[in-house]
Image: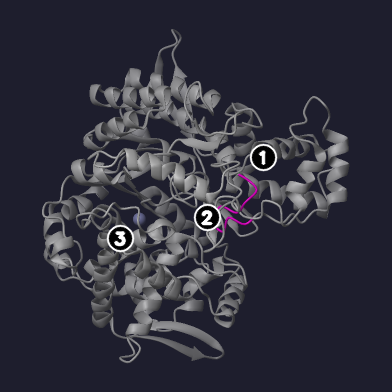
Amino acid sequence: MNKLFGFTIMGVLALTACTTANESVQEEQPWIVDRFDDIKVIRYEVPGFNELPLEDKVLIYYLAEAAKCGRDILFDQNFKYNLAVRRTLEQIYTASEVREGAQFAAFEKYLKKVWFANGIHHHYSNDKFTPEFSEAWFREQLASYINDENRHIEDDLLCKIIFDKELYASRLNQTAGVDVITSSANNYYEGVTQAEVEAFYAKMIAADEGNPEPISYGLNSKLMRNEKGEIVENVWKIGGMYSQAIERIVFWLEKAAGVANPTQREILQALIKYYNTGDLKDFDAYNILWVKDTESNVDVVNGFIEDYGDPLGRKASWESVVNFRDEEACHRTEIMAANAQWFEDNAPINPAYRKAEVKGVSAKVITVAMLGGDCYPATAIGINLPNADWIRKEYGSKSVTIDNITYAYDKAALGNGFMEEFVLREEDRERMKQWGKYSDDLHTDLHECLGHGSGQLAPGTKGNELRTYSSTLEEARADLFALYYLGDPKLIEIGLISTLDVAWAQYSKYIMNGMQTQLSRIEPGKSVEESHMRNRKLIAEWCYEKGKAENVIEIVKKDGKSYVVVNDFERLRELFGELLCEVQRIKSEGDYEACKELIESYAVQVDPEFHAEVIARNKALNIEPYGGFVNPEYELVTDAEGNIVDVKISYPANYVEQHLDYSTNYSFLPSIN
Ligand code: ZN
């Protein structure tokens, strides 16, 4: 539940790049390798890879192979017919002899979107894609290229899935008052209602009552009915559901364990054990070993980790991130970690909800070497794991920010005109130009390495009281912690910033994004659903309203356009502190009613006129609101005796080829699981 997604996607991160001038805008274009619909695909580089010792390179190679092997799992988790749909589309795409015309172009775009979203629902809005090719044309393709040997799904069902607007309309429905399980198309549950799911897990949790090491029940299984009609968990493990893919993941993890240092070997073996047993106690044991290792240069996230895809926040999607340490950039997070207790002790919250002793805040900046599963093609720019609250409390958490990914976003957004369009005042633009990228980095670090780890629950609060609102509230808490401290003179004292202008640059950007520019990612008529977007809107709108009498934040109208402007940064910082106090209280006390009221009042509804204006202005700039990546490729170099002597890295620049390659060489699951 603790990933920080880039609001860089909006092009806000373009800002710093402007200080180094636009001299190489033309040359920089290759950072973007594909554009379609609302998506741009960027390549990222892996600086420092060639300088790594051979054993690190080989370890990365094996972990990268493991990262690619779980791709099918995510497709299937997102929707039970995704693999059948993808395979049929790929078959038509590669076999097709007539590769031109409007119908084929629309079909290609649809397939590119399916690859990007790991399924037929938008990765961010969760809405099913609307095809722009006709059913008649598609049926001709089926007749030409799909036969009994390569058919994965009946033609009629396939056409219904693609063309019937009402069927499987949303992957993740969080609408209040409806059954969020039966109305969501994800494959985490089948044949069970929301009430049945809640009763099933309430019983498990009640049986575990008082366990100081509570199990993350339901994390690694599909809840469904067996032949007798009983509700059972189908566990994702070797010998269970997704076995064929997990076996391949484990094959490469075993290779990795063979070349890892002793500490890491033990960690990887614990992960392999968990993949074999599917026992969530083994997962906790693995996480404890993993979080304690802050020394190894190479690190990996590999498993069923984040629960954003489940409306009840229980089932985790499969993901992997292979990375290694960026030594230079680690310096600033080390300063934060060294001062973690000071930040906790001075947080503007009820002292009863501060942690008496902040444990094991490890923070580092990493270079990503491979993205897989739910981190590919779209990825987070920071990670904070593990998610189990009791492990975080007892053993701490590992927090990372991903520098080569933010760098690539930054490069891809060069000179796109975003700032000129949405930032009214020259002084704000100047401040953002000078400090934008750095203030983003600091904000991410504070959010990940201090924000999520701060605070504690009141006695008696279990941590699951906030239900569907918990992710939004938790992200708001971490963001508010970061925003509040970004403007603290303490940061100057400990050498993280030289001027509060760094904070003010972030304040202007954050409020503008939360109230206005992020809305370009919402379709007209829709409300805000995604938890990170909700969190930003909540913070910005709450501060706007509370500071209205003092004109802290102002919506300025000029030449028919609206601009969101911060007039009083110091007062805004106080408002961040006040909201943090309330958000922490809600979390600590598990106050569901107050949480619902806060989020429904500020974070969800969009003013239609204001919304339409943002969309129109953003559209005129031709900036795709979402970004994702192609991975680099690694190749083992061997000598005459077959010994590995090097690992070569290359940067492919073809989105389509990468996905066809993955679908050919890293696809291990049946079409229906
Ligand atoms: Zn977060």
Image quarter of the C terminus: top right
Report the image quarter containing ligand 1.
bottom left
Where residue 476 appears, as percent x and y from the top left, is: 34, 64
In the image, taking residue 499 as reference, residue 438 lies left or right, namely right
Disc 1 designates what residue?
Answer: 81
Near mark 1 (Cα within 10 A), the count class, few <14, some 14-19 or many ≥20, is many
The secondary structure type at the circle numbered 2 is strand
Above or below, 603 against 62 in this view is below
Q: Amino acid at mark 2?
A: Gly
Where residue 475 appears, as percent x and y from the top left, is: 36, 60
Q: Amino acid at mark 1?
A: Tyr
Relative to the observer, which residue lies in front, 646 or 179?
179
* Number of numbered callouts drawn: 3
Does the CB distance between marks 3 and 2 fall below 8 Å?
no
Can you see residue 414?
A: no
Nearest-to-viewer mark from 1 and 3: 3
Above or below, 649 against 601 in this view is above
Query: Majority secondary structure of the magenta segment?
Result: loop
Magenta stretch in the rendered image? 119-127
The tag on residue 590 is 3
Sequence order check, earlier mark of 1 and 3: 1
Sequence order check, earlier mark of 3 and 2: 3
Where on the picture, by quarter, is residue 87?
Answer: top right
Residue that sits furthest to the top in the current view: 641
